[in-house]
Image: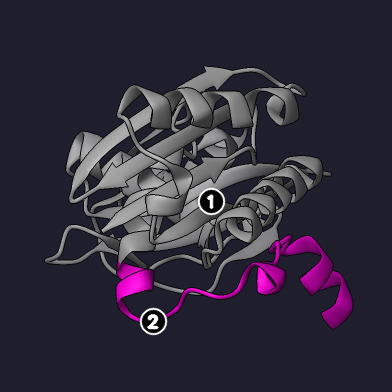
Amino acid sequence: MMLIAIDTSGDACSVALLRDGELHQRLESAPRRHGELALGMLEDLLAGHGLALSEADAVAYARGPGSFTGVRISVSLAQGLAFAAGLPTVGVSTLAAIAQGEYLRTGHRRILAALDARMGEVYWGAFEAGVDGLVDAAGAELVCPPGSVPIPEGADWWGAGPGWQGYGSVLIGHLTGSQVLGYNGQAICEAGAIARLAVAQVGAGRSVAPELARPVYLRDRVTQRS
């Protein structure tokens, strides 16, 4: 299987190529330059391996949450590429991708992923790595103040993501009872982790036509419920 993945949901811009289990990624920290960089990075990546976009099985993208503009760019790029090559798309949670990347780097199997949602809130999700080496959600993703995040069951949780960098002390104070081992506030969403998670979705038949690709903002969803 061959997948293309794109992430422009945060400050970093990354693209990845996953082919038969072999991963290649390009990443650049370039706030507000994602739109001009992503396609060129992907073209270089494919050309460097003598491959064409049409050879891919699907285009995966960061569906959010994250920067509203960044998430929209990610979805739009994936749609454009998929339409051009006649491919399906796969949306992957940015929080899940953060957790997946941190698990692969550190071996921590229980990850609490957090992004700074501004307005004194965090985007939040709890994930556990399975026997297949892929993380799965251990609860619903949500946006809320850091002092109100759900306390997960069990022990040996590890924090990851920029939300921990900004609100680490508040989160640790709130989550003491859940035995959080520590956190990495530098962990980010990367296209490589998106590609790894997308493979399972494609295998399970959860890819969709490009016109059905959608962002997930979380904050809009919460606002509608209130």
C-alpha distance separating marks 2 and 1: 20 Å
Residue identifier under label 2 = 205
In the image, what residue occupies the spot 50% across and 55% down?
Answer: 59
Looking at the image, which is closer to me, 84 or 198? 84
Q: Is residue 50 left or right of residue 22?
A: right
**x and y percent of residue 61 in the render?**
55, 52
Q: Is residue 26 left or right of residue 133?
A: right
Residue 203's image quarter?
bottom left
Looking at the image, which is closer to me, 205 or 11? 205
Q: How many marks?
A: 2
Q: Could you tell me which secondary element the residue under label 1 belongs to? A: helix
CB within 8 Å, label 2 to label 1 = no
**x and y percent of residue 26 in the render?**
43, 24
Query: With respect to residue 172, does 30 lie above or below?
Result: above
> Is residue 132 visible to the viewer in this orientation of the structure?
yes
Query: With respect to residue 75, does 26 lie above or below?
Result: above
**x and y percent of residue 67 in the render?**
74, 42
> Which stretch did the figure color magenta?
200-226
Name the image colouring.
Answer: one colour
Q: Could you tell me which secondary element the residue under label 2 belongs to? A: loop
* Quadrant the C terminus occupies: bottom right
Please say whether residue 14 is one of the residues in the magenta stretch: no
Could you say which disc has been placed on residue 179 in the image? none
In the image, what residue occupies the spot 27% across and 67% down?
Answer: 154
Q: Identify the amino acid type marked 1.
A: Thr
Q: Identify the amino acid type marked 2.
A: Gly
Residue identifier under label 1 = 94
